[in-house]
Image (cartoon, grey):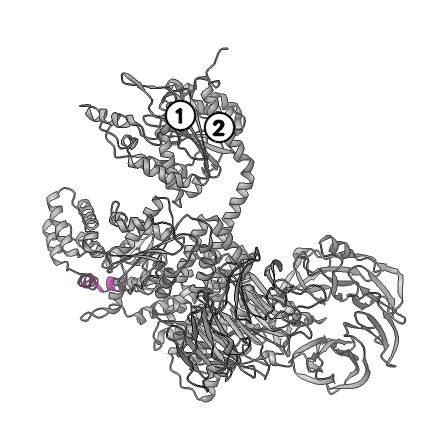
């Protein structure tokens, strides 16, 4: 058989991304592009040889030592036999792009300092920047890394690719590309070196006129440390790669002999996933094939085809998973509130580190031991301590590089006192969590689950909460032995340094955790015995060589031609440095200003003072010596650099300076020239050179006054910021931004303000931080006062719109806190009445500026609480909707609501100020809510008697679902429930079982049979979610494995308990699960360490009268070392176990709870008054006066800004603005939450939920009146213009709430019923004087509660509908006409037939039936099945669906009814329309999932609430897109009872009962 070689191609000119293709492929036209070969085809760099519009993947060829991009792969180095192009005709490989990478690896040629690492970096960069295509007319190329990648390598090329893989794995720029590498083919790659590499270099070095030895040749030697390092690094990161190693079996000619260049032992890796294959070839021919029938070619081709088939089968799934992962990370970045990627800091710092320096730290034996330490569950810390300006941050940056170079998972945070966010330990944890999530799929999965199940928003969480839920709850429990390295620079600049370090030292982790810390000298706590702590103090000799290298580099660049003078200058600078990198940097920058003559340099060097403070003085003198205008400009720049919340960009600063200085040529150059080297511009951000420079400029020295007064500086920034946002133009700018994306579906998380910031760089900064600068300004600044008042009076609403566009309303609450802080500075001269107003904030603001500013601040807080979600969805609603919905005496209502303007009109609320109650919810009729718990997404109420847990949505206060611990008809009493740490699982303890539930689904996860006969006293989750600790009244605590039901451990106190007489009345386990507190009635509290049954700690008492002799309730503090004891005398005692000291507080309390962060204590007393106190001084900050109601349980929300109480059948939700505490970054150094309240008077409020609640509602005739039935049995008429009471209609029993009302259309008849079954009807008459006359009617009692009343069209008859029976009464004769018992309990709705006055209609989920009024006989011919039945069943609602409400259009042609699916169905309510003329046709309203609740009709439009609680209208027979949103309901109007009673009149007036009142909204349908 004759073998034919491929035809010889023709060559042409080629570029860096040179193109190569064979004429064989020219016929592929649109699928493949080719270009002619150039005369010099073997170019350096990455060359695209065969293109494809939709490639399946990329194959990249990398040659070896002495090779080239094309000839290496060509038989006899003839490019006519370039075999990689043959692959494009192979089945399974034809759709791959072919690349070849060339690099300078020649033996001959000039000396070069390049090595394998350099070649690897070039390969990575070439892949990243590839932008070429061979296809004519193709505009967009497919980036490398968007498809799977296979490398084919020869000899040293394999080492280049291995090194590139390791480098790219830990470089953010390349990691996504490297993640796409599927496999590597190694052809004769010397993984363990080649013995002839050293011989080759020796030969090259001995040639008199030959080339010098090459670094990359030396790296191939068998004793090369480079090969050892790269093999170790590659081994760690190649677990998921396919590897194929082909080794040579023929000897290669080497001079006068033949040898195996790469032995088999060196040519294979020996890894489990590696395929090793011999080829019948020598070192040169192993990568060259003469024909496609060459067995060696077939072997290589087959492995490529096999790999391609493998990953192409999973490409679709892989791409889906990758897209899901990217979406997941983007979502986590938003949830974790990561503003800048952590790599930003790393890259900026990398520019400051001189190559080759900082090596001393990574080569120290103790550092090496720390890196290579054996795995342990306890932390291993390396703490680097140094004086200011000794290069600690640069060292930390180098440590990150070193650890990543070694292939370790390294995550980092650089604290900065000049950046208010980056100095937060909470932000540090969020940043670390995000970094870990980017590389650890398991951690990312668990973190996403936590967010989804709990609804937690980390941006508002404190350090302890994030530490507990994310690090202790997830990271430290991961089952992996791969160590995690954390590098934390400047720990002393963090806001909670002591607490952070304490947690780091005592952490326990399944994952090995190694922590590198840097700080200035500070108190370093001793490490626990189980932890390892290495401390290193930076000495001058440590950094000496680095400083020398830096000095020499700078001096050599400035004075390149005078080595002797260089050495002299370097020695003089070094002599004054005293180990300070910063001093050297600033001194050299100062010298550079005088590098003209040697004499100038020597003189300047002599004048440079030794030490930082003298140097700063000299730098400041240079600033002051400038002309006045330049000096002022420098001062303004330094003021912004020092006082700003975060570093400004050059563009932002340019705008900020514009009021005084305009038209900069290059501002960054100006900054460097006029600011005396106090500032630097890094990554286009202006920062101070060091924290010590900030201190010097702000505080000066003993003989040098401060250059910048901080109050004056902040005043200037505040005025500039306020003037900038006090412009009418912003409303138009925001409108244009809003039009581009008018309705955000993902709950407003998109930052639309960024669109406006593109053209207005400073807008984002001043929008977020103007109030911060106001709070730091002097209270006596009159100019600021004038600007601030003008802003609040004219431009506030457009600012709020800007905040809403950003999607982050935290800036609104944060601004409120800043404004309050400023208001506290204002002098107050108030009489006693004014002070009462200040406490309650319910009256009109005083003329005092301080009072007004506090009122404005309260408005900000309540806007977020009441309207937040809707405001983010519709930012423009701040202009027309929100001001009228605010209370009449709020500053926003008083300032921005113009009487007579065409806007909403709100009446009916007696309170003219903000209320604190968000919702008052009923858990069930005749049910008692005994316990309440809260997570971020839900709150839960327990009905102990039935074993039922009601789960409510925290956002909307709606019932989400119910958990039933009891099974069957027998109710199991459940006295206790408990949450896991992350708030995703619930444990309930019954008489016979313990059950664990998933809160988000109500699914039962585990069930544990109760083994003890004793009474369960406490249950808590263990260190994992599959452990449960149970305390029983025999004083034992048993730890169970929930997956196996096995007993893991059991604690029983060995101290004799006989003297204590009987069972304890209380057991409480500490948060760290190490201690248990047990109390008996009449005995002091006792605490046992559960690791030692002999370790008993008795609460010290001073005598028989000591309140501690009668403990009633115990609450542990989060640290587990102290606890609060509520005594029978109502006193509270703080007991510190470490000091064994108790602090007594005379607080009258009956119940108490502590917030998750330990900052607040909530108590209730015997009359139901609730109080909030701050720790540690227990200062009262808030009190809610109650109307003598017994409160059973209390709890805080996880963020401490809301609390819940249970009383009888009610659960109340409270969100007072007094609990909106400053963010951690807003506190001064060393301050606490308690300190922020130190000068704050307590807020006194009144319990709205204690009002006589509206329990039934009906709208009267002509829109002028409405009627309320209340829980005290009263039925009262109100006029709707002002909401005033007009006439009491009747009284039911005071102990029976009115549950159903109906008012006839003419207004002539009114009927009511209560929960005892009593029905009262009255005939009403409106007299000429405007008063109502009431005449007696029906007064009967039936056996069950009434569900509905229906009047006949002529108002002569009344239908009374109950679940089991219906009655018809004659209203005039007051007699029963007929009744009908239902065959089964019905759950439908009745309505009088609008077309036939003798008939009435009943609609349920299965049928429509007509009945005669006089007999209640069903008319068979009118029986119709509504279309919604089919729809409901088809959508999974099942037969359990019910009709919740009906409404009739004004023309009486359309009957609208609402079908509510079963509680188990995910489907929402459906609206269907029945034609009243024949009752023969029903159709589903095409509104999808928009409907939350049907309200009624206005004209011929359906009125409903959507899921965002907008009142919407939809004109019958219009398209689904024609829904109109009119206005939304404030959050504090939303509770289950209120929504059930909402109604709308024929004129479009909207009614919403709220606690004991009814809100009347007019003109809403016109908006």
Q: Mark 1 falls on what kind of element?
A: strand
- Is residue 616 in view from this perspective? yes
What residue is shown at x 24% (from left), y 63% (from top)? 631
User: Between disc 2 and disc 1, whose residue precedes?
Assistant: 1
Instruction: From the viewer's side, name the closer residue of 693 and 268.
Output: 268
Q: Residue furthest left?
A: 599
- Magenta stretch? 613-635
Q: Which mark is residue 1414?
A: none
Q: Is the residue 524 above or below the residue 1150 in the image?
A: above
Task: From the top left corner, tell me how far across and down residue 668 is, in percent.
Answer: 30, 54
Alpha carbon of mark 2 to alpha carbon of mark 1: how far? 14 Å
- Is residue 875 in view from this perspective? no
Q: Local crowd at mark 2 within 10 Å, few (<14), some, or many (≥20)? A: some
Task: From the top left corner, tell me how far across and down residue 1488 is, in percent.
Answer: 67, 56
Quarter of the figure with residue 1367 = bottom right
Q: Residue furthest top?
A: 1
1471 vs 422, left or right, is right
- Select label 2 or label 1 by which is in front: 1
Q: Is the residue 466 above or below the residue 1056 in the image?
A: above
1174 vs 874, left or right, is left
Q: Mark 2 falls on what kind of element?
A: helix
Residue 298 on the magenta span: no
Residue 634 on the magenta span: yes
Circle 2 residue:
303
Task: From the top left corner, tell me how far across and down residue 1061 is, in percent.
Answer: 53, 78
Quarter of the figure with residue 777 = bottom left
What residue is shown at x 47% (from left), y 14% (from top)? 4
Instruction: From the viewer's side, name the closer residue of 609 and 1398.
Output: 609
Q: Local crowd at mark 1 within 10 Å, few (<14), some, or many (≥20)? A: many
Q: Which mark is residue 247?
A: 1
Instruction: From the viewer's side, name the closer residue of 706 and 1061.
Output: 1061
Q: Please, what is the dominant secondary structure of the magenta stretch?
A: helix
């Amino acid at each position: 058989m004759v073998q034919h070689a491929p035809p010889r191609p023709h060559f042409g000119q080629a570029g860096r991304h040179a193109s190569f293709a064979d004429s064989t492929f020219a016929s592929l036209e649109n699928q493949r592009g080719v270009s002619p070969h150039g005369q010099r085809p073997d170019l350096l760099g990455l060359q695209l040889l065969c293109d494809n519009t939709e490639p399946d993947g990329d194959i990249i060829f990398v040659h070896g030592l002495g090779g080239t991009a094309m000839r290496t792969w060509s038989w006899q180095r003839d490019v006519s036999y370039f075999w990689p192009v043959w692959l494009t005709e192979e089945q399974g490989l034809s759709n791959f792009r072919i690349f070849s990478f060339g690099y300078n690896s020649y033996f001959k040629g000039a000396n070069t300092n390049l090595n394998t690492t350099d070649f690897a970096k070039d390969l990575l960069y070439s892949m990243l920047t590839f932008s070429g295509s061979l296809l004519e007319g193709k505009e967009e190329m497919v980036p490398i890394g968007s498809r799977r990648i296979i490398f084919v390598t020869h000899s040293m090329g394999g080492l280049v690719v291995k090194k590139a893989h390791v480098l790219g794995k830990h470089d953010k720029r390349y990691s996504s590309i490297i993640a796409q590498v599927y496999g590597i083919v190694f052809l004769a790659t010397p993984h363990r070196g080649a013995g002839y590499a050293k011989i080759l270099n020796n030969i090259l070095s001995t040639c008199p006129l030959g080339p010098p030895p090459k670094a990359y040749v030396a790296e191939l030697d068998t004793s090369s440390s480079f090969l050892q390092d790269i093999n170790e690094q590659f081994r760690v990161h190649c677990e998921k790669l396919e590897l194929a190693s082909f080794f040579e079996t023929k000897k290669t000619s080497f001079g006068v002999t033949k040898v195996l260049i790469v032995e088999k032992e060196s040519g294979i890796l020996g890894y489990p996933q590696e395929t090793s294959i011999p080829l019948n070839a020598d070192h040169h021919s192993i990568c060259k094939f003469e024909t496609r029938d060459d067995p060696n070619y077939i072997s290589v081709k087959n492995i490529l085809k096999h790999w391609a088939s493998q990953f192409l089968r999973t490409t679709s799934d892989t791409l889906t998973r990758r897209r899901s992962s990217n979406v997941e990370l983007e979502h986590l970045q938003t949830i974790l509130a990561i503003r800048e990627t952590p790599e930003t800091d790393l890259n900026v710092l990398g520019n400051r580190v001189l190559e080759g320096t900082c090596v001393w730290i990574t080569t120290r034996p103790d550092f090496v031991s720390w890196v290579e330490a054996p795995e342990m569950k306890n932390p291993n810390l390396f703490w680097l301590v140094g004086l200011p300006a000794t290069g600690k941050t640069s060292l930390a940056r180098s440590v990150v590089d070193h650890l990543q170079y070694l292939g370790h998972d390294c995550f980092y945070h650089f604290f900065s006192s000049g950046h208010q966010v980056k100095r937060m330990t909470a932000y540090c944890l969020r940043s670390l969590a995000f970094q870990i999530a980017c590389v650890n799929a398991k951690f990312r999965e668990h973190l996403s689950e936590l967010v989804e199940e709990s609804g937690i928003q980390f941006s508002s969480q404190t350090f302890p909460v994030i530490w507990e839920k994310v690090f202790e709850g997830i990271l430290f429990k991961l089952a992996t032995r791969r160590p995690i390295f954390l590098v934390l620079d400047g720990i002393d600049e963090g806001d909670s340094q002591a607490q952070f370090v304490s947690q780091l030292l005592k952490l326990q982790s399944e994952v090995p955790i190694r922590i590198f810390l840097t700080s200035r000298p500070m108190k370093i706590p001793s490490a626990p015995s189980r932890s390892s702590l290495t401390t290193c103090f930076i000495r001058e000799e440590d950094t000496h060589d680095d400083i020398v290298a830096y000095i020499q580099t700078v001096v050599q660049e400035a004075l390149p031609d005078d080595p002797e003078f260089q050495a002299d200058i370097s020695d003089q600078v070094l002599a004054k440095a005293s180990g300070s990198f910063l001093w050297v940097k600033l001194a050299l920058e100062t010298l550079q200003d005088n590098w003209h003559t040697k004499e100038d340099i020597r003189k300047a060097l002599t004048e440079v003072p030794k030490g930082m403070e003298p140097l700063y003085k000299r730098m400041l003198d240079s600033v002051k010596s400038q002309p006045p205008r330049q000096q002022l400009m420098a001062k303004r720049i330094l003021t912004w650099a020092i006082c700003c919340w975060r570093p400004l960009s050059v563009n932002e600063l340019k705008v900020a300076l514009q009021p005084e200085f305009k038209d900069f040529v290059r501002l960054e150059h100006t900054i460097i020239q006029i600011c005396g080297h106090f500032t630097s511009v890094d990554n286009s951000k202006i920062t101070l050179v060091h924290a010590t420079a900030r201190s010097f400029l702000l505080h000066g020295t003993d003989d040098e006054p401060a250059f910048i007064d901080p109050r004056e500086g902040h005043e200037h920034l505040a005025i500039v910021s306020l003037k900038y946002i006090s412009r009418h133009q912003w409303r138009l700018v925001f409108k244009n931004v809003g039009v581009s994306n008018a309705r955000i579906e993902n709950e407003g998380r998109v930052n639309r303000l960024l669109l406006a910031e593109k053209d207005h760089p400073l807008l984002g900064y001043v929008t977020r931080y103007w109030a911060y600068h106001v709070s730091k300004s002097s209270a006596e600044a009159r100019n600021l006062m004038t600007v601030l008042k003008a802003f609040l009076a004219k431009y506030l609403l457009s600012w709020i719109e800007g905040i809403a566009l950003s999607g982050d309303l935290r800036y609104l609450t944060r601004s409120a806190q800043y404004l309050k802080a400023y208001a506290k500075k204002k002098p107050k001269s108030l009489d006693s009445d004014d002070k009462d107003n200040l406490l309650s904030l319910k009256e009109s603001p005083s003329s005092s500026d301080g009072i007004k500013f506090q009122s404005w601040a309260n408005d900000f807080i309540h806007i977020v609480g009441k309207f937040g979600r809707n405001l983010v969805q519709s930012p423009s609603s701040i202009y027309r909707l929100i001001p009228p919905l605010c209370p009449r005496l709020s500053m926003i209502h008083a300032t921005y609501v113009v009487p007579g303007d065409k806007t909403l009109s709100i009446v009916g609320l007696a309170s003219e100020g903000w209320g604190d109650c968000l919702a008052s919810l009923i858990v069930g009729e005749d049910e008692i809510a005994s316990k309440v718990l809260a997570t971020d997404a839900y709150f839960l109420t327990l009905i102990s008697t039935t074993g039922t847990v009601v789960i409510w949505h925290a956002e909307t206060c709606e019932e989400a679902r119910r958990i039933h611990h009891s099974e069957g008809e027998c109710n199991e009493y459940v006295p206790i429930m408990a949450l896991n740490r992350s708030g995703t699982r619930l444990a309930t303890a019954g008489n016979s079982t313990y059950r664990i539930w998933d809160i988000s689904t109500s699914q039962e996860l585990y069930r544990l049979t109760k083994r003890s006969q004793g009474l369960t006293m406490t249950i808590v989750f263990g260190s994992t979610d599959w452990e449960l600790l149970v305390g029983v009244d025999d004083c034992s605590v048993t730890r169970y494995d929930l997956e196996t039901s096995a007993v893991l451990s059991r604690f029983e106190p060995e101290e004799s308990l006989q003297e204590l007489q009987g069972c304890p009345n209380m057991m409480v386990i500490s948060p760290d699960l190490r201690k248990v507190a047990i109390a008996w009635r009449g005995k002091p509290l006792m605490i046992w360490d559960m690791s030692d049954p002999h370790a008993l700690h008795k609460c010290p008492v001073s005598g028989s009268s000591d309140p501690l002799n009668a403990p009633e309730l115990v609450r542990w503090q989060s640290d587990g070392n102290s606890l609060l004891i509520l005594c029978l005398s109502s006193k509270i005692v703080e007991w510190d176990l470490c000091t064994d000291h108790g602090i007594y507080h005379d607080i009258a309390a009956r119940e108490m709870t502590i917030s998750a962060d330990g900052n607040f204590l909530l108590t209730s007393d015997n009359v139901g008054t609730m109080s909030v106190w701050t720790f540690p001084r227990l200062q009262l900050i808030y009190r809610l006066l109650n109307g003598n109601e017994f409160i059973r349980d209390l709890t805080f929300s996880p963020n401490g800004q809301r609390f819940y109480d249970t009383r009888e059948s009610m659960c109340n939700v409270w969100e007072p603005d007094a609990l909106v505490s400053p963010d951690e970054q807003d506190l001064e150094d060393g301050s606490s939450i308690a300190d922020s309240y130190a000068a704050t008077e307590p807020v006194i409020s009144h319990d709205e939920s204690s009002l006589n609640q509206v329990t039934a509602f009906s709208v009267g005739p002509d829109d002028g009146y409405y009627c309320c039935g209340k829980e005290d049995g009263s039925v009262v008429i109100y006029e709707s213009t002002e909401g005033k009471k007009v006439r009491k209609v009747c009284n039911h029993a005071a102990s029976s709430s009115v549950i159903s009302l109906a008012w006839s259309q003419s207004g002539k008849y009114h009927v009511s019923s209560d929960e005892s079954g009593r029905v009262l009807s009255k005939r009403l008459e409106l007299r000429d004087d405007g008063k109502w006359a009431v005449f007696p009617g029906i007064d009967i009692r039936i056996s069950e509660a009434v569900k509905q009343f229906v009047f006949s069209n002529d108002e002569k008859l009344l239908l009374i509908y109950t679940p089991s029976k219906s009655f018809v009464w004659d209203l005039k004769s007051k007699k029963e006409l007929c009744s009908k018992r239902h065959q089964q309990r019905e759950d439908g709705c009745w309505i009088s037939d609008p077309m036939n006055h003798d008939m009435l209609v009943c609609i349920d989920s299965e049928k429509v039936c007509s009945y005669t009024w006089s007999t209640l006989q069903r008319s068979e011919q009118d029986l119709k099945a509504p279309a919604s039945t089919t729809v409901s069943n088809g959508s999974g609602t099942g037969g359990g669906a019910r009709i919740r409400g009906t409404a009739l259009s004004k023309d009486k042609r359309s009957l609208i009814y609402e079908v509510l699916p079963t509680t188990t169905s995910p489907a929402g309510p459906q609206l269907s329309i029945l034609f009243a003329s024949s009752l023969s046709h029903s159709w589903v309203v095409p509104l999808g999932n928009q409907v939350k609740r049907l309200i009624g009709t206005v004209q011929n439009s359906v009125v409903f609430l959507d899921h965002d609680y907008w009142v919407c209208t939809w004109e019958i027979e219009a398209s689904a897109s024609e829904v109109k949103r009119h206005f939304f309901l404030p959050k504090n109007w939303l509770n289950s009872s209120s929504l059930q009673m909402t109604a709308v009149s024929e004129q479009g007036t909207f009614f919403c009962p709220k606690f004991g009142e009814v809100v009347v909204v007019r003109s809403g349908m016109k908006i």
